[in-house]
Image: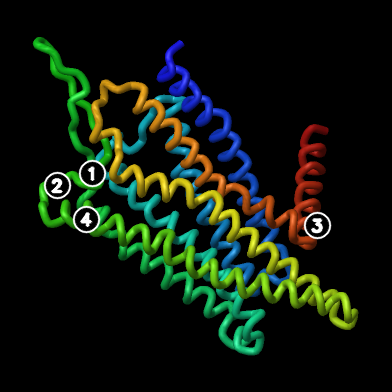
């Protein structure tokens, strides 16, 4: 069995097994997160509102993003080539959801950093109204920044089989479906850097600074709790929340960075620029890309696990909801 065939098989089973697990676990986890976060007594706080918005974005990203890959691998259905409008809309939705989720995480982390650095100020500016305003501004900014996708993306015809007697064509969904040299220059020479900055580099820097502030505060809080029991309960609760936010940021760093780095490198070494008859090189490229992509989608699936590990109230409410579901199922069987 040649190397290319082995890697193609690995790629296929990675999508089916690991991708299938991610979409099932991530969908269930994000739905449970929404249910639990809205049962909390503090559900009207700005932090829980932002975490609920993050769960909605993560759930939508798994359904529209990972779900599309699984449909293609399992049922051989590529939804983007069904119609030109679906191509435009799906590309646009994905390119809006991913940065919105990233910036919601940034906003939550900034809020927690501000709460430990300037606690009096955070009580004045971080409330329900300000949370909704910031969410609307974030979403509208990303929507506007990516509106060019709706205008210029679409289905493009490409030859898939050619010989002396037959000529077959297929379609693929492309960012560049209209002949416009100005937009092509923008797409190739400007947009990759804009996208890298607002999707990863700027969030990475902000999260890094905020997490240094939060970790410093956590260490200080732990020392304080050892010396005083007066407000130990309240401080412990806030410390666990801060630790959870730090782990959310760490999972973002670890799981999102590989794909962004791989895409940045692949921008210069993409197989489209190589000889497609080199099956081995394309198979290796596709396998590595799938691994990086699944790591990326893991970031949208594991937040529920982090909430359960670090949130006592979250864990209790999750047990309560699951027990209620089990009792309901038993009653239905009877």
Distance between mark 2 and mark 3 Cα atoms:
54 Å
**Position above or below: 211 against 294:** below
Q: Nearer the viewer, mark 2 or mark 3?
A: 2
Q: Which mark is residue 316?
A: 3
Task: Say which residue appears at 75% left-offset and 61% top-offset.
Answer: 311
Disc 1 or 3, which lies upstream in sequence?
Answer: 1
| Image location (x, y in percent) of residue 194 | 31, 61
In the rendered image of this protein, does residue 186 appear above or below residue 127? above
Q: Look at 54% across and 64% down and name the residue there.
A: 105
Picture disc at residue 154: 1
Find out whether the residues at labels 1 and 3 contact each other: C-beta distance under 8 Å: no
> Is the residue 46 above or below the residue 270 in the image?
below
Say whether disc 4 or disc 3 marks the residue closer to the N-terminus. 4
Helix, strand or loop at mark 2? loop
Q: As rendered, which of 262 and 13 lies closer to the eye?
A: 262
Residue 85 position, x and y percent, is 27, 44
Task: Indicate which label's residue lies in the foreground, 2 or 4.
Answer: 4
Q: Which mark is residue 189?
A: 4
Sequence-wise, the earlier of marks 2 and 4 is: 2
**What number of labels is visible?**
4
């Amino acid at each position: 069995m040649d190397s290319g065939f082995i890697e193609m098989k690995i790629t296929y089973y990675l999508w089916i097994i690991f991708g299938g697990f991610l979409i099932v676990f991530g969908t269930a986890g994000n739905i449970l997160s929404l249910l639990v976060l809205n049962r909390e007594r503090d559900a009207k706080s700005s932090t829980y509102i932002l975490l609920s918005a993050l769960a909605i974005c993560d759930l939508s990203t798994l359904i529209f993003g990972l779900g599309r890959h699984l449909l293609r691998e399992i049922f051989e259905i590529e939804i983007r080539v069904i119609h030109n409008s679906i191509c435009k809309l799906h590309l646009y939705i994905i390119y809006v959801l991913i940065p919105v989720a990233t910036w919601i995480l940034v906003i939550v982390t900034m809020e927690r950093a501000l709460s430990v650095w300037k606690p009096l100020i955070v009580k004045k500016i971080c409330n329900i109204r300000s949370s909704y305003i910031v969410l609307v501004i974030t979403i509208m900014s990303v929507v506007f920044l990516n509106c060019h996708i709706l205008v210029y993306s679409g289905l493009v015809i490409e030859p898939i089989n050619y010989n002396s007697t037959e000529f077959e064509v297929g379609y693929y969904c492309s960012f560049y479906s209209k002949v416009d040299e100005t937009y092509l220059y923008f797409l190739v020479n400007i947009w990759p850097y804009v996208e890298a900055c607002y999707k990863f580099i700027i969030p990475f820097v902000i999260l890094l600074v905020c997490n240094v502030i939060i970790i410093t505060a956590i260490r200080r809080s732990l020392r304080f709790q050892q010396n005083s029991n007066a407000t130990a309960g309240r401080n412990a609760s806030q410390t666990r929340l801060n630790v959870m936010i730090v782990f959310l940021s760490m999972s973002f760093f670890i799981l999102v960075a590989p794909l962004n780095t791989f895409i940045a490198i692949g921008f210069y070494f993409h197989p489209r620029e190589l000889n497609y008859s080199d099956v081995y090189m394309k198979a290796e490229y596709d396998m590595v890309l799938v691994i990086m992509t699944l790591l990326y989608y893991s970031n949208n699936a594991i937040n529920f696990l982090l909430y359960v590990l670090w949130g006592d109230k979250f864990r209790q409410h999750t047990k309560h909801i699951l027990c209620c579901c089990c009792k309901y199922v038993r009653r239905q069987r009877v």
